[in-house]
Amino acid sequence: MTVLPADGLSLAAEFPDPSHDQWQSLVEGVLRRSGKEVTGTAAEEALSTALEDGLTARPLYTSADASADPGLPGFAPFTRGSTATGSTTGGWDVRQRHALADPVRLNEAVLGDLENGVTSLWLSVGGPGGVPVSGLGRALEGVYLDLAPVALDAGADPGPAVRELLGLYETRGIAKEAVRGSLGVDPLGQAARTGAEPELGPAAHWARLCSREYPGLRSLAVDALPYHEAGGSAAEELGLSLATGVAYLRELTTSGLSVQEACAQLEFRYAATADQFLTIAKLRAARRLWARVAEVCGAPGAGAQRQHAVTSSVMMTRRDPWVNMLRTTLACLGAGVGGAESVTVLPFDHALGLPDAFARRIARNTSTILMEESHLARVIDPAGGSWYVERLTDELAAAAWSFFQEVERAGGQAAALRSGMVRERLAATWAARSKDLARRKEPVTGVSEFPALDERPVEREAVPAAPSGGGLPEVRRDQAFETLRARSDAHLAATGSRPKVFIAALGPASVHTGRASFAANLFLSGGIEPVHEPASVDASTAAAAFTASGATIACLCSTDTLYGEQAEAVASALRAAGAEQIFLAGRPGKYTGADVHVFAGCDVVAVLSSELDRMGVA
């Protein structure tokens, strides 16, 4: 859209439209000054970022990248939203998760949340950490069940919890048409988590009951979190959710429901990550894909997917957990902008155990601030029309549909889980991502980047462990570095000090600061304490400084020029002083004297794990 001033003339009238070739030529010039001689499309590719699923984020998008008409909100293919008004009338549903076994404590937490902004409850019932079925009534005492929807997470046998909840509605005089929420029945999701054989018959029973008697209550959850938490990519998460949804449609229509009635019984649950653009595109693509499924099944108007977005547990860290507040804020932003009807923000201390009242307050207030102060809910599909978001939505939908077809050719979701196909595919994806994490190509703030060894640990009440079984694993981005840090902690507890590395910086600070900071940050991520005192050394002072540091290893840090002039002599002095291993910050070159080179893109986890092994740090 061209903005015209009062006189009607375009402000850009005297400026010619730049061409793509002109922009590319400017990029070539910038890259040339940084030492990269690339031309043409190679210049653009040098600035591109590879994503999972074979996707690429390019540095520039133009109108040529615009997708086909995404439609209008509330109309097929529902890319822009499942309803015509989106979340503009009251914002998205702020759904807080609770997993407390004590009904009294759970009741206090629930009432506190509802009084301070939460609009629905997601309750773990039965099983490890969940409130007992018999305590559900006490847990919901004082809750206006006609105003606060309840979503259940009742594990592999949801029947008792479902009957208890429906009984509470009846005894409290709640009209059936006023009941809202989700029973959370998800046999295929439970099969993914536990490895048990799914039984779809009971799910069909509850779906028929809700369809006949509880028009506002959805019976089945299509939970894609187990696949995300096992290391799956966005396209794999979407593809497996489609396969699960199709399996439920087959079961429900066979049991007597129409396609439209069956679709109305499903609520889809997806992970929201700190990559806000990918989260937005994933939710938009999910709605488009499910609309296509409904269309193929003969009910195109039934494809308005209801979505529940949950901030990713994979991205949550145990070290420096306060940074999790930033991650969940970005994830919540992506979920809200992406059009999820319900959003659950996990508390920042989720990875440490049961959240405290402060963590729950921050979690619920994240949604409140984004809606009430940033006004994100006042615009329907605010990212719509962005060439990048539209293109990413298209490409992600295509990749997810391809994987969905692969699962269907394998016999469907249950067969793919049973055969191990899903496990193998997700494991391969996580293995590739783990390499990027180990090389810090995907940095984790507070863990692999800018860690603080002296931080005070945050302690929380432990969550009861779930029984181990044959289900999909649960992964975390921080797990490799967490293992290294745990070894350092154990060494500190046993000896009173952490393993140390002496930073042997050559030349003035103006030349060595960059690599010295890089090296210190790298060693800190593995729990090895850097000692950088004095600020600079040479062959005559290195030995005394190393001895005073109390370290057993050293790392040379400077420019390539000074490495050529001083590295060998300084390394010899360090070895004479007892250095057992000498590192050098920089890629291998003509200079000599170092045992190991550390540089941007090296396998940090492998280097530090090997060094801790050599140092005898268990």
Image (cartoon, rainbow, N blue to C red):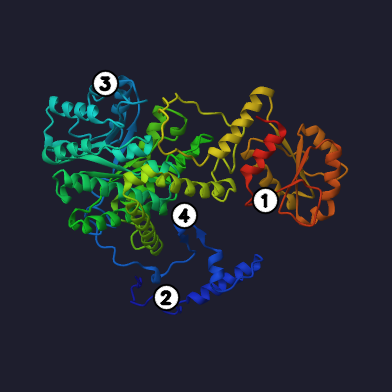
Amino acid type at circle 3 is Gly
Tell whether label 3 touches label 2 (CB within 8 Å): no
Amino acid type at circle 4 is Glu
Which disc, if any, is residue 52? 4
What percent of the width, then of the height, locates residue 480?
Answer: 56, 39
Q: Give the camera-side residue of 435 and 278.
A: 435
- Element assignment for label 3: helix
Amino acid type at circle 1 is Phe
What percent of the width, then of the height, locates residue 591?
Answer: 80, 54
Q: Residue at x 34, y 57 (%)?
A: 401
568 over 322 or under it: above or below: below
Which residue does the numbered mark 1 point to in the structure image? 599
Q: Give the camera-side residue of 154 and 119.
A: 154
Quarter of the rendering containing residue 464: top left
Q: Residue at x 53, y 39 (%)?
A: 478
Which of the two labelled residues, at mark 2 and mark 4, occupies the earlier sequence position? 2
Which residue does the numbered mark 3 point to in the structure image? 135
Q: Nearer the viewer, mark 2 or mark 3?
A: 3
Which of the two labelled residues, at mark 4 and mark 3, occupies the earlier sequence position? 4
Which residue does the numbered mark 2 point to in the structure image? 12
Which of the two labelled residues, at mark 3 and mark 1, occupies the earlier sequence position? 3
- Element assignment for label 2: loop
